Every structure is written in C-alpha cells, then in structure tokens.
C-alpha cells in the first residue's frame, strides 16, 4: 500500500517534467526559482538523507557530493551550494539525476517492504508531502522560466472546455456569525504539517466573505481606475515596491495596443475576463481590497468560512489533477484550488506550537517571520495535498505562485 502510494507520488514529479527540453531543466532566472533538475534531485535527497541513511543498514550514498548540491536550507545537515548558484549546475546532467531517482526509489521500496515503525512512517509521509510541495513549485518555476523567455514557449496545449466558462457567478458575500471558533488541525487521522498544530480557539466578530475569487475583469477595473498610481490605496512598502519595480499589472500580463495578454502554460493568451486574477502580490491584493472598500480575510476568518461553506473539497475544484494549471471561472466557492488566497494574517506560530528536535525542526518554524499566510491551494496543488487548515506562506512581494484575492468585511 505504502509502496504504491510512494511510487505514485514520485512518478507524478517526472510526469510534470514530461514536456521539458534538456535546457529547460537547468535555468534559474531569479534566485527564488529553482531549476527543475534541482527539484527532482532535492526531493530525492530528502528521502536519502532522512529515511535511508538513518534507517537502512549499510546504505551507500548514490554520490557523496550530492548532499552539498541538493540540501536546501537544513543547517543541521551542513554546508550546501548557495541558493543563487543552483542554476550553475550544468552537471550532474539530467540523465544522472534520473539515475539518482531510480537508485533511491529502488532502495526506498526495499525499505518500505520491511518493518516500518511510527517514526519512520512519519518521515516517509513527510517526504511524500514535501515531494508534492515541490511538484507545485515545479509547475510555477517552469511557468516562470518559460514565461520570462521572449519567445513565450508553450508548456502544453491544453484545452478543457468545461473549465472555460463565458459567465461567472455574481460576486456575493457569505455571512458568518460572531463567536468562538476552533482553528488548526484536530483530527484523529491524516497528515498535517507542524504549523497547523496547536489547535486553539479564536473569537471572530460577525463578518462576511466573498463567494468566489476576484476575476481578471474586476481587477482590470482597478487598473483602469488608476489603482497603480493612487498612493492612497497602498501600504508604504507596497508603494515603494511598485515604484522601484515599475509594477502596473499582475505578473505575466502584457499590454499590446488596447488589449491585455497573459502568459499561461499554453503560451501568450488574451486575458480571460471570467477567470480569477492571479500572480498578484500581497500588496496588490491589499490595495485592490481597499479600492473596493473591503479588506482581505484573516486566516482565521478564511478557515472558519471554508469549513462552513466547503467542508469537503468539491469535485469541481480546479486543482493540479486537472492538469490545466491555470485558475478557471468559479464553479464552486473556490475555497479550494484555482489560487492561493492572500490573508491579512502574518505567518506566526499558533499558541502551543512546538518545533520538533533535529533537522526536521527546520522544516517550517524558522520561516515564521515577515511572511503572510495564504490558504486554499491552487490549480498547481495536488488534490490530496490540501485541507481547510493548510497554511502556506510567502513574502508580501512574491507573486510567481498562483496567488489570488478573496474579499471580506465586518458586518
Ligand atoms: Fe524542499
């Protein structure tokens, strides 16, 4: 059972890379992008380092130098190549990385066939969840690599008419009563990251939250109304950020004559007015909400509204299993899928949060500074990798993930 699960998740990473050319595997156009080749090796290193080395008797590293190349940020493990140098690794070539994956997979399958104690099970499960996080990063990093190439090459030719609606449901608001609500992961079974633990209560005033994400055409109204040049709408950091970086539209938007185009994994396409706006920073989401005389929800408001209105992931949710990899017009309340939703909550530890000992304690806890929480998953998130309590986090200026906007207000 675990072998099947392991093999399925591992092969999904290879599947995402099926359309890439050799040169695509190496590029690192910005420091926050990792080359696809590096993702494939790093996720493999994770299993080698944390599952095989401590648990498989006589295990021999595939290559003694690989831990230096493919450790991401684990200080406990030791020295590693600087992040901005990942794109200089023309060697090991992709075939060698694929050999590395096969070698580790074969060793992992032998390990999985044996006796697995709870601690090892948890490490393997974490490795698989980690692999799925990198699958999302693979998609968004591939989009950044291809989308910043002046030729705007296609990743795929994806047509799914079911996802291409001409109309969108009216923007309405879902009312939520004031009261004490439980926040965080509190289930007997199932996986969660340590940052979801510390189940606790919060008091929320009466509020309402929008029944879908903000669309491209709604965001275009903000642009037409000179939202990007009205300092009154912006936080000081956001205003500096748009000035310094000459930002006047979401990432991947290109204006030609009077029309807006957007780079998608299908190549450059005309903006779809009914699809959710995506690739916006926290600053842009916040300014848009202010322009609408609304605000972004807190992560606690988001979680309680999600649990009430979309307790389970709807079948129509647009997650990575659609292989569309673009947000689509709303068929649901869109709490799940399409875009990660910026919340107004800083990424902080919950009360009772405990960082685990050892290297894996570095997984989440040390990033709880200067970042904002996003909720709900995106069109690049695997469907079995998202839940109402899942906390994602990015810096407020970052927008290469599929990030979007949901509005809220107090009543
Ligand atoms: Fe990682």
Image (cartoon, grey):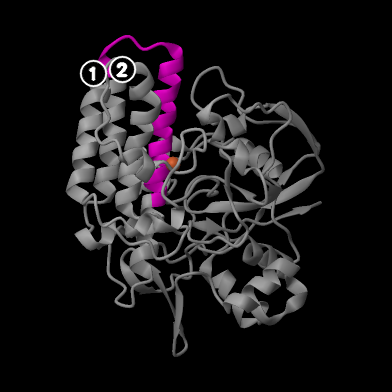
Residue sitting at x 48%, y 66%: 274
Position above or below: 386 against 255:
above
Label 1: which secondary element: helix
10 Å neighbourhood of mark 1: few (<14), some, or many (≥20)? few
- Whether residue 77 appears in magenta in the rendering, the answer is no
Left-right relation of 326 to 94: right
Q: Which mark is drawn over residue 385? A: none
- Whether residue 118 appears in magenta in the rendering, the answer is yes
Position above or below: 11 against 151:
above
Residue 260 percent across, percent down from the top left: 46, 80
Considering depth in this image, is 204 or 171 the residue closer to the camera? 204
- The quarter of the rendered structure image containing the N terminus is top left
Separation (CA) of disc 1 from disc 2: 9 Å
Residue 410 percent across, percent down from the top left: 80, 52
Asked whether disc 1 touches disc 2, contact meaning CB atoms under 8 Å apart, the reply is yes
Residue sitting at x 31%, y 27%: 5
**Total numbered circles:** 2
The segment highlighted magenta reads 110-137
Residue 282 percent across, percent down from the top left: 63, 60
Q: Which residue is mark 2?
A: 56
Q: Which mark is drawn over residue 110? A: 1
Residue 158 visible, this orientation: no
Ligand 1 quarter of the rendering: top left
10 Å neighbourhood of mark 2: few (<14), some, or many (≥20)? some
Q: Which label's residue is closer to the chain start, 1 or 2?
A: 2
């Amino acid at each position: 059972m675990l072998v099947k699960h392991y093999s399925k998740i591992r092969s999904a990473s290879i599947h995402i890379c099926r359309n890439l050319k050799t040169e695509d595997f190496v590029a690192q156009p910005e420091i926050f992008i990792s080359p696809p080749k590096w993702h494939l090796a790093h996720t493999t290193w994770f299993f080698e380092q944390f599952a095989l080395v401590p648990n498989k008797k006589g295990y021999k590293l595939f290559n003694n130098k690989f831990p230096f190349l493919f450790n991401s940020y684990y200080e406990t493990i030791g020295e590693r190549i600087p992040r901005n140098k990942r794109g200089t690794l023309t060697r090991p070539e992709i075939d060698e990385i694929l050999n590395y994956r096969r070698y580790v997979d074969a060793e992992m399958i032998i390990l999985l066939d044996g006796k697995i104690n709870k601690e090892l099970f948890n490490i393997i499960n974490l490795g698989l969840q980690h692999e799925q996080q990198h699958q999302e990063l693979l998609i968004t990093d591939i989009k950044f690599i291809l989308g910043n190439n002046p030729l705007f090459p296609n990743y795929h030719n994806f047509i799914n008419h079911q996802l291409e609606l001409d109309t969108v449901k009216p923007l309405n608001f879902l009312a939520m009563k004031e009261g004490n609500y439980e926040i965080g992961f509190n289930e007997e079974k199932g996986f969660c990251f340590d940052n979801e633990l510390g189940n606790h209560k919060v008091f929320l005033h009466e509020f309402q939250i929008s029944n879908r994400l903000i669309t491209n055409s709604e965001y275009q109204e903000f642009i037409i109304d000179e939202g990007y040049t009205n300092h009154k709408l912006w936080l000081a950091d956001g205003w500096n950020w748009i000035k310094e970086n000459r930002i006047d539209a979401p990432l991947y938007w290109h204006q030609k004559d009077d029309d807006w185009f957007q780079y998608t994994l299908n190549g450059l396409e005309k903006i779809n007015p009914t699809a959710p706006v995506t690739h916006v920073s926290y600053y842009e989401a916040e300014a848009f909400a202010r322009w609408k005389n609304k605000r972004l929800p807190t992560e606690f408001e988001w979680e309680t509204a999600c649990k009430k209105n979309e307790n389970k992931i709807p079948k129509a949710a647009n997650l990575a299993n659609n292989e569309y990899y673009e947000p689509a017009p709303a068929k649901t309340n869109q709490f799940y899928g399409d875009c990660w939703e910026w919340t107004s909550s800083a990424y902080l530890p919950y009360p009772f949060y405990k960082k685990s000992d050892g290297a894996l304690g570095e997984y989440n806890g040390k990033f709880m500074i200067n970042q904002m929480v996003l909720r709900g998953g995106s069109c690049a998130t695997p469907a079995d990798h998202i839940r109402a309590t899942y906390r994602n986090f990015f810096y407020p200026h970052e927008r290469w993930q599929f990030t979007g906007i949901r509005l809220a207000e107090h009543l």
